[in-house]
């Protein structure tokens, strides 16, 4: 299959289809179209292989990284890498990811707390995550109570 001659809409359908074979998803993840949506659809596809998600976690477009962070099949080490992303939307998605462990969430909170201006959205996402331990929730209430709803 020659992806270079495919229309964007055809690539888009392939990238978001959970039945698309892994080798095609790997090729689509390398799509260099100025429109990054193809890579974004690959990042959100539940059948995208781990090595592709790892590569997309380093994409120049924050939206692609954010979709990797929200993919429930993204492994912990990739989530850990994304937990300190420059974009707070990516960090929010890490905090909301059901695969994020309590250890990762605590590490992410420590990172967020170290920032000159922690993101209110990340703090809230961490706070409502049921995997965040109670002691960390109390620290958030103490330090960032004004950010909570």
Image (cartoon, helix red, strand yellow):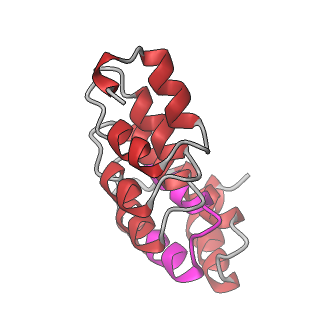
Q: Is residue 46 magenta?
A: no
- Of 129 and 49, which appears nearest the observer? 49
- Indicate whether residue 97 is drawn in magenta: yes
Q: Position of residue 129 (x, y in %)?
A: 68, 66
Q: Name the chief secondary structure element in magenta.
A: helix
- Observer able to see residue 81: yes
Q: Is residue 124 left or right of residue 27?
A: right
State which quadrant residue 134 falls in: bottom right
Q: Quadrant of residue 39?
A: top left
Horizontal side of 30 relative to 137 (left or right) equals left
Can you say whether 132 is above or below 44 in the image? below
**Residue drawn at point x = 50 percent, y = 62 percent:** 74
x then y, percent, for residue 12: 50, 26
Q: With respect to residue 122, does 132 lie above or below?
A: below
Residue positioned 37% across, 30% down in the render: 1
Compared with 130, 29 (above or below) is: above
Q: Is residue 89 at all visible to an observer of this figure? A: no
- Which residue range is magenta in the image? 88-109
Q: Nearer the viewer, residue 58 or 51?
A: 51
């Amino acid at each position: 299959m020659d992806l270079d001659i495919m229309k964007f809409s055809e690539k888009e359908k392939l990238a978001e289809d959970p039945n698309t074979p892994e080798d095609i998803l790997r090729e689509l993840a390398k799509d260099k179209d100025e429109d990054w949506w193809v890579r974004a659809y690959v990042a959100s596809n539940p059948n995208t292989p781990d090595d592709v998600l790892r590569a997309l976690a380093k994409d120049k477009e924050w939206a692609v990284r954010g979709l990797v962070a929200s993919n429930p099949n993204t492994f912990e080490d990739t989530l850990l890498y994304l937990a300190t992303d420059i974009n707070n939307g990516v960090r929010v998605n890490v905090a909301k990811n059901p695969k994020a462990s309590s250890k990762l969430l605590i590490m992410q909170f420590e990172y967020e707390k170290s920032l000159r201006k922690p993101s209110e959205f990340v703090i809230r996402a961490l706070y409502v995550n049921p995997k965040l331990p109670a002691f960390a929730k109390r620290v958030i209430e103490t330090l960032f109570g004004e950010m909570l709803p």
